[in-house]
Image (tube, rainbow, N blue to C red):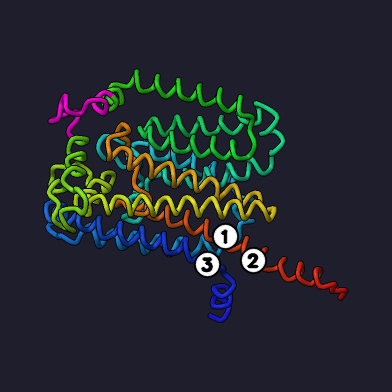
Amino acid sequence: MKLLLARVNLFHFDPLLLCVSISLLLIGFVMVSSASLHLGVKMTGDSLYYPVRQLMHIGLGLILGGCVAATPIRFWEENGPKFFIAGLMLLIIVLIPNLGVKVNGSIRWLSIGGLRIQVSEVVKFFSVIYMAGYVTRHQSSVQDSAFGLLKPLALFSVACLLLLLEPDFGSAVVILMIAMGIMFLAGARLSQFIVLLLIIGILAMLLVYFSPYRLVRVTSFMDPWADPLKTGFQLVQALISFGRGEWLGVGLGSGIQKLFYLPEAHTDFLFSVIAEELGLLGVVTVIGLFSLLVWRTFEIAEAAEQTGQRFSAFIAYGLGIWFGFQSFVNMGVNMGILPTKGLTLPLMSYGGGSMMIMCCAIALLFRVQSETAEINASTVPAQHRGARGYHG
């Protein structure tokens, strides 16, 4: 017990990061509860079914997050490649008949101990760790050679192919953004980076064009009112939610769209429920919290880089890209500015795997910040002694 207390006392908590994370968790839990009470009655006869399970997800996430926060960054740096290979193995396992859980036509989950774990969320977490380690070990190769960029992208291409077989196009885009973003921040040549982006963009368009259901999503996104009862139904209902919310919303729990009008109201389209019940005020608050989260994440990354902790810095940069991009896509889909993608709102949407992995990601960020603060605390006194002419 004394050892545990000593470790807690040595851990440097970031007040802003802690407040933002807790705020997102609390708002998310309240809104998931509001969006799922009626669904629980219909599916299980228990209105508290989804809120209780989400509370369990958060609890498990905090426990796992505590373990991650207690693990030195050196451990992640040494084992990053192994974790990424393990993530690829999970993507293969989920595609094996009778092992992967099929929901709404997609096989993305593994059932472990009664919990559904979305494998792609685990892969995103491991992708950040692997890429941070790669650019740290091969800095000159990434900056000077095209091969330095293509080598990790070959592994990521395998992961994307497996994700597309589920199918999970959204998660494939997210891990590519993580990889490309970290390499860009590591100093990859802009010309090579632009060429890679063009190639990836062309491949993405071909995937959409030759996949009927993806093409329908894009065309319905461009004009959802052309078929408001079929292909455009979900987006139309989301837009109605935003329209009904106006400035201050219709009131917590008083939303109508969640009552079987808006599909996936407690998961992918939770932001629309927030818009209807809390109005523009709630929307701006959530956007502001995510903006603060991403801003603080990049500040932590910059601080780590200034102390020479390159791996820690790229961990934080990768997490910032992940949080920012995924939340932007989710909110953009809800507002009708992006085609529909099955991505959750980080730390807020219902889901065991997503919630637990996001808690682990935030905990890893806390670890980066703590070790950076510890280094700064140990160097400042030495600098003061030198300034005062201290000779030992």
Give the side of residue 153 with respect to residue 380, left or right.
left
Q: Say which residue appears at 59% left-offset and 36% top-offset.
A: 184
Position of the C terminus, as image quadrant, is bottom right
- First reached walking from the N terminus: tag 2 or tag 1: 1
Q: Residue at x 45, y 42 (%)?
A: 90
- Could you tell me the amino acid type at mark 2? Glu
Residue 102 placement (x, y as % from top left): 29, 39
**Label 1 sits on residue:** 369
List x then y, in percent, for residue 157.
51, 30
Label drawn at residue 13: 3
How packed mark 2 is, by other alpha carbons closer than 10 Å (few <14, some 14-19, many 20 or more), is some
| Displayed quadrant of residue 132 | top right
Among the two numbered marks 1 and 3 on one chain, the one whose residue lies closer to the N terminus: 3
| Magenta span | 219-233
Residue nearest the viewer, comparing 96 with 2: 2
Q: Residues within 10 Å of mark 3 (few under 14, many from 20)?
A: some
Q: Name the element at disc 1.
A: helix
Q: Circle 2 sits in a helix, a strand or a loop, which is it?
A: helix
Residue 71 falls in image quadrant: bottom right
